[in-house]
Amino acid sequence: MIIVLKPSTTEEQLNKFTNMLKNDYQVKVNKWDGVHSTVLGLIGDTTKIDIEYIDAQDIVESVKRVQEPYKKANRKFHPENSIIKINDEISIGDGSLHIMAGPCSVESEEQIVGIAKDVKASGATLLRGGAFKPRTSPYAFQGLKAEGLDLLKAARKATGLPIVTEIMRASHIDMFENVDIIQVGARNMQNFELLKELGKTNKPILLKRGLSATIEEWLMSAEYIMAGGNNNVILCERGIRTYETFTRNTLDVSAIPIIKRLSHLPVVVDPSHASGKSWLVEPLAMAAVAAGADGLIIEVHNDPPHALSDGAQSLTPEQFDGVAKNVFALKDALSKVQ
């Protein structure tokens, strides 16, 4: 249930009303202060609450029940866009466009530092790179693990770029203490025990959509993290599995405006994993920006033919430079007409 209070509501009235809801109905009350009004979100069994009685209170502007199972991720509970701060320097969700760029897998210090310098020069604001790699084949390169994390930190020191990398299990959380954004991959979107533990942290979490997850399932996974107390969630559309085999996945561009309507959380798009083909990255990135994405996560490798993972979908630094120029130009053009 959502209750919108009148702008004239005093702090004393708010506290008295909130305590009544908690004590009389045994519900949890979350409060969001907007620019023009205060919104209360009631979580729990609200079936016994008389909606007409609540609506009749002097301080209540409007009240309505919420049917969706996700509450904290729901825009009805949080009308204004959430802005996720990275190191108090980068804001994702504030209307600007950010690009996270880097290799699928960290392979060496020379490789990751060199790529980090290149993508930063082209406008990337965050460095992505895999230290722990979930692979379909058990014989494929699984990442450098802890050493890979150290190399990412070395690249951050050399460039100042915050780092984004994927976690595989809850027992690794302590190892990610100095990671700026923890990525939850598509295969772990419904690893609920991992999501619960990440909910106990205050780290920004990049939550990728599962291989065949519905939008509601995706938002419910975000709810697991937020229910634990961590509201710093960024959603990532990376394509879903359909009957089409030409591309690695099918990018669901419609998910961007849908999420924007249903949720207040920012959305970034991964055109690299969606397509699996480097030549498709730019048009999909452009489509994502046009649809309202808050950011992009793009794979860049200094030598794609010899990459230890996902070389076919990786851009060279030179190719990335051209893509970055075009997506930023599109963002600027869209800003002028909105």
Image: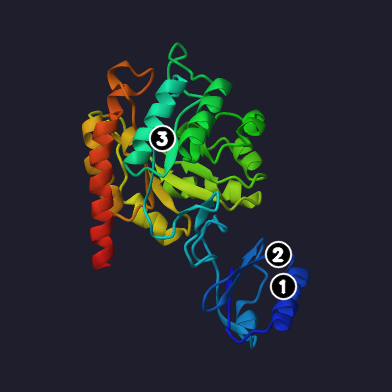
Quarter occupied by the C terminus: bottom left
x 39%, y 60%: residue = 95
Percent coordinates x, y for residue 115 in the rendering: 37, 30
Query: What label sits on residue 211 in the rendered view?
Result: 3
Quarter occupied by the N terminus: bottom right
Query: What label sits on residue 27 in the rendered view?
Result: 2
Q: Nearer the viewer, residue 191 or 184?
A: 184
Q: Nearer the viewer, residue 272 or 329?
A: 329
Percent coordinates x, y for residue 159 in the rendering: 45, 37
x 66%, y 49%: residue = 228
Q: Are marks 3 and 1 in contact (CB under 8 Å)?
A: no
Identified by mark 3, the residue type is: Leu
- Could you tell me how far apart the alpha carbons at marks 2 and 3 are, in whole angstroms? 35 Å
x 64%, y 84%: residue = 9
Q: Secondary structure at mark 3?
A: loop
Side (left or right) of 289 relative to 78:
left
Mark 2 is surrounded, within 10 Å at the Cα level, by few (under 14), some (14 to 19) or many (20 or more) other residues, namely: some
Q: Secondary structure at mark 1?
A: helix
Q: Are marks 1 and 2 in contact (CB under 8 Å)?
A: yes
